[in-house]
Image (spheres, helix red, strand yellow):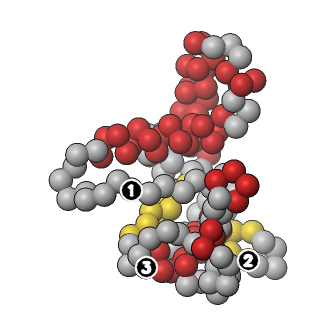
């Protein structure tokens, strides 16, 4: 479901890999992933393949409401939430899933959500991207 929505860049990591990273450890709990250290997390991202399904999704909303983008200036964030919530609804009731997954989105800030997670650090500890601290940029081995 996530790949079809354009979120095909994915990497698993243990919560402790992120929470125990030297950049994250000294920060307050609002910057940590709120789960046991041995909990499996999944980092989800995208490449340019996101744009076709995103544009189609926005087009569907504009067909229903021509002012959708004016009322939703963060349409890409809304699309990400839609894609993830669609997946979570599909997983509801799957045997073996004891608790509802916890989701943290990249656009969350201390001011808006009371928490803030570094996607660059998560990608680095998951082995998804190399983080160059001097440039403050992440580099994926195939996508750049």
Nearest the camera: 39 or 8?
A: 39
x, y percentage for residue 95?
Answer: 18, 53
* Residue at the farthest bottom position: 22
Q: Using the numbered discs, state the Cα–Cα distance from disc 1 to disc 3 in whole angstroms.
A: 15 Å
Please tell me in which quadrant of the rendered image residue 61 appears.
Answer: top right
Q: How many marks?
A: 3
Marks 1 and 2 sit apart, C-alpha to C-alpha, by 31 Å
Quadrant of the frame with the C terminus: bottom right
- For residue 101, the mark is 1
Query: Compared with residue 83, is residue 60 higher up or lower down, i.e. above or below?
Result: above
Can see residue 95? yes
Mark 1 Cα-neighbour bin, 10 Å: few <14, some 14–19, many ≥20: few
According to the image, label 3 marks what residue? 37
Relative to 28, is 11 above or below?
above
Residue at image point 55% right, 43% down: 80
Query: To which residue does mark 2 refer?
Result: 132
Residue 102, x across and y down, in percent: 44, 57
The residue shown at (62%, 68%) is: 30
Q: Indicate the secondary structure of the residue bearing disc 2.
A: strand
Between discs 1 and 2, the one toward the N terminus: 1
Q: Secondary structure at mark 1?
A: loop
Residues at discs 1 and 3 in contact (Cβ within 8 Å): no
Residue 54: which quarter of the image?
top right
Q: Disc 2 to disc 3, how far (Cα)?
A: 25 Å
Q: Name which of mark 1 and mark 3 comes first in the sequence.
A: 3
Q: Earlier in the sequence, mark 2 or mark 3?
A: 3
**Which sits in the foreground, 86 or 57?**
86
Q: Are marks 2 and 3 in contact (CB under 8 Å)?
A: no
Percent coordinates x, y for residue 26 in the rendering = 67, 84
Residue 129 seen in the figure: no
Local crowd at mark 3 within 10 Å, few (<14), some, or many (≥20)? some
């Amino acid at each position: 479901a996530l790949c079809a929505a354009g979120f095909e860049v994915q990497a698993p990591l243990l919560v402790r890999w992120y929470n125990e990273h030297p950049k994250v450890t000294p920060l307050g709990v609002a910057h940590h992933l709120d789960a046991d250290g041995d909990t499996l997390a999944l980092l989800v991202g995208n490449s340019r393949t996101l744009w076709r399904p995103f544009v189609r999704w926005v087009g569907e909303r504009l067909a229903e409401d021509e002012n959708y983008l004016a009322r939703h200036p963060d349409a890409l964030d809304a699309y990400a939430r839609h894609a993830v919530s669609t997946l979570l609804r599909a997983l509801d009731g799957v045997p073996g899933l004891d608790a509802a997954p916890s989701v943290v989105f990249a656009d969350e800030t201390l001011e808006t959500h009371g928490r803030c997670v570094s996607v660059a650090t998560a990608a680095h500890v998951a082995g998804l991207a190399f983080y160059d601290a001097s440039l403050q940029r992440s580099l994926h081995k195939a996508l750049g």
